[in-house]
Image (cartoon, helix red, strand yellow):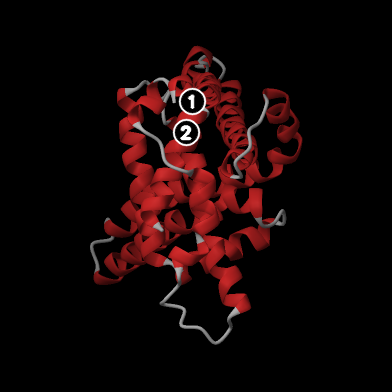
């Protein structure tokens, strides 16, 4: 399943290279707001803080709309940029919540952990460790937050619940997915975040969730089956046929095959 997931993600990224790059350019432009504008407003502290907060929240709303748009790519379709702007209407609530959750994680990491470590006691060390592993759990679970919103539910409480359920039922898969996202992020640095970039990472997470859901459809149809022995080769037959195989020449010169 892992090999096919990586293969399908790469194929879909390549087939939608232009769209992914434009989404990434839009995110770079959005990120420029909280990065470059607040320093110009240092003489007006309130306006500086408001601009920073609004800019960061807008970035998460943008990512939420991108995740909703990229869902169609995972489903062997495509999307137009008019679709992206339409998705903004439904994406802003989940984007704001995602921004709030990331803010809380950031505060815990930058403020709470140093505070308890500076206590210089066993209790402080214990509390710092608890907070640290809570942050790790949050990151591993919430990486699928936008993908779950795009595919499974719109209620925030149910989205968070399903994030936790997916992690506790698939911890190794979630760790692998986070590692893939970090590798993609590192690779994006060398490509100026144009590819794979944030959009590529969102597409991978949607692909990962989409394929993982086949497991639950199969378990629902076979309630007495062994949960540790999922017949991925059988479940992904149709997916492999739809994705197909390609030669190197087909990647570079698709019109020649």
Residue 151 in view in this figure: yes
- Outermost bottom residue: 224
In this rendering, the answer to whether 70 lies above or below 171 is above
The answer to which quarter of the image holds residue 125 is bottom left
In this rendering, the answer to whether 217 lies above or below 211 is below
- Image side of residue 66 versus residue 9, left or right: right
- Outermost front residue: 257
Residue that numbered label 2 is attached to: 13
Observer-nearest of 43 and 17: 17
Residue 17's disc is 1
Q: Position of residue 132 (x, y in %)?
A: 35, 59
Observer-nearest of 190 and 15: 15
Residue in the image at 76% along x and 35% along y: 89
In this rendering, the answer to whether 139 lies above or below 231 is above
Q: Position of residue 186 (x, y in %)?
A: 31, 34
Residue in the image at 54% along x and 87% along y: 224
Q: Position of residue 238 (x, y in %)?
A: 55, 55
- Image side of residue 87 versus residue 242, left or right: right
Observer-nearest of 138 and 124: 138
Would you say the residues marked 1 and 2 are in contact, meaning their CB atoms lie under 8 Å apart? yes
In this rendering, the answer to whether 25 lies above or below 97 is above
Secondary element type, mark 1: helix
The image quadrant where one finds the C terminus is top left
């Amino acid at each position: 399943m892992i090999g096919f997931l990586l293969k399908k993600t790469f194929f879909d990224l390549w087939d939608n290279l232009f769209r992914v790059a434009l989404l990434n350019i839009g995110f770079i432009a959005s990120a420029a707001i909280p990065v470059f504008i607040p320093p110009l407003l240092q003489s007006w502290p309130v306006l500086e803080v408001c601009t920073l907060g609004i800019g960061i929240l807008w970035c998460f709303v943008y990512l939420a709309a991108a995740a909703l748009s990229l869902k169609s790519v995972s489903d062997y379709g495509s999307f137009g940029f008019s679709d992206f702007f339409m998705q903004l209407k439904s994406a802003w609530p989940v984007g704001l919540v995602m921004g709030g959750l990331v803010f809380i994680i950031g505060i815990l990491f930058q403020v709470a952990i140093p505070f308890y470590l500076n206590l210089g006691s066993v209790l402080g060390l214990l509390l710092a460790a608890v907070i640290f592993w809570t942050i790790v759990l949050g990151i591993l679970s919430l990486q699928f937050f936008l993908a779950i919103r795009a595919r499974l539910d719109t209620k925030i409480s149910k989205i968070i619940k399903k994030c936790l359920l997916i992690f506790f039922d698939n911890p190794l898969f979630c760790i692998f997915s986070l590692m893939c996202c970090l590798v993609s992020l590192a690779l994006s640095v060398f490509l100026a975040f144009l590819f794979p970039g944030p959009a590529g990472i969102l597409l991978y997470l949607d692909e990962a969730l989409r394929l993982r859901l086949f497991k639950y459809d199969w378990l629902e149809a076979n309630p007495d089956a062994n949960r540790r022995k999922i017949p991925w080769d059988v479940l992904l037959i149709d997916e492999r046929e739809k994705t197909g195989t390609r030669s190197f020449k087909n990647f570079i010169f698709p019109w020649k095959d």
